[in-house]
Image (cartoon, rainbow, N blue to C red):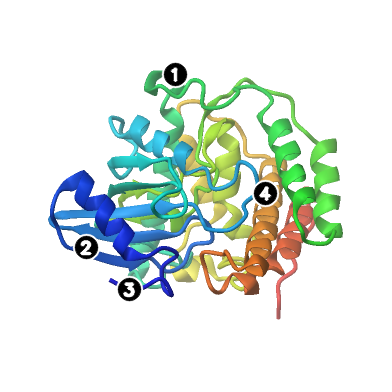
Amino acid sequence: MGDRGVNDFAPEVLERFLAKRFGAGRLKLERISGGQSNPSYFVDWGELRMVLRKQPTGPILKGAHAIDREYRVLEALTPTDVPVPRPILYHSDADPLGTPFYLMERVEGRVFTDTTLAALPKDERKSTWMAVASTLAAMHAVRPDDVGLGDFGRPGGYFERQIARWDRQYRESASGPIHEIEALYNWLVAHLPGDDGRVSLCHGDFRLGNLMFHPSEPKVVAVLDWELSTIGHPLADLGFCVMPWHTEPQEYGGLLGKSLENMGLPTQEDFVACYMNATHDPAPLLPFHVAFALYRFAIIFVGIADRARAGSAADPEAEKLAPLARRFAIRGMEVAEGRPHTVSP
């Protein structure tokens, strides 16, 4: 079962909780490696195969690690065409695991963290990336009001509110000032586009590593990690999803500098065209949307660095990611100003 040195709670307390909820059983517990956010575990209890997601221990920023919102989205999307794990239960009390947590079904499939999809045959890589684009379009086709998420966020002024929120989170951080993040913030504020009225459910972290694929087909079977989801603008998700084309491999696994054609990978233009062909209300992806995505991820890395210093990061390698806050802000300014990306020799 492991011990508290591996997990951030004692397995015995989870055993007692599961026995009360599901009856007698035998616990098999395994912490899922990787991930920068909410600690996650495979949990087998008798015939039940589940995943447990919980908030990290230690201090967290207000509004971060919102697993209650994550669980609500799973409940709302289960009847739709958007593939999500079936939610099982949400537990709001800190006892017995030290933080709130929830359980969802364990979906069998493959997760790819390598954006080059090197583990796949060359002729399957483009179709796998296209499945990402079409799944994103399917999610944006869901009307929040139709699934009980009409009050999940405010529909108008999304980018303005988000920029203010991430700036506030940056300024509340224990990290010192980062000039490049502040320069990118100033550019975004100065180039904020007018509100075009488009509204959708936004995932907030829609990327390859947060999707589970069919065991043998280029098909998404589960969209994971919904803690940043809200009501917002669909191009925020699309801009976030194309970040790999703007960052190098050492910058959290980007594609910049890779020979896409030789590797059987799509260009950003291919990916965006697939999304646009599948969406119900296409609008052009602007440099602002991509720069905004890079800005958000830069501040996410600031938070990762803070948690690493506090000893509460979900990933033991988190401390090594701290320099990426500055790097992503630099990439954002390259996009914002229309400059060619610098590529390491």
Asked whether 342 or 83 is in front, the reply is 83
Residue highlighted by disc 1: 145
Category of crowding for the residue at label 2, using alpha-carbon neighbours closer than 10 angstroms: few (below 14), some (14–19), many (at least 20) = some
Amino acid type indicated by mark 2: Leu
Residue highlighted by disc 2: 27
Callout 4: SS: helix
Judge from the rendering whether residue 257 lies leftward or rightward of residue 147; answer left or right.
right
Would you identify the image quadrant in which residue 251 lies? bottom right
Asked whether 86 or 173 is in front, the reply is 173
Which mark identifies residue 296?
4
Question: Residue 46 at what x, y percent from top left?
Answer: 14, 57
Give the CA separation, mark 1 to mark 4: 27 Å
Residue highlighted by disc 3: 2
Q: Which mark is in front, 4 or 3?
A: 3
Q: Which mark is in front, 3 or 1?
A: 3
| Residue at image point 28% right, 51% down | 17
| Residue at image point 67% right, 65% down | 305
Question: Residue 79 at what x, y percent from top left?
Answer: 28, 30
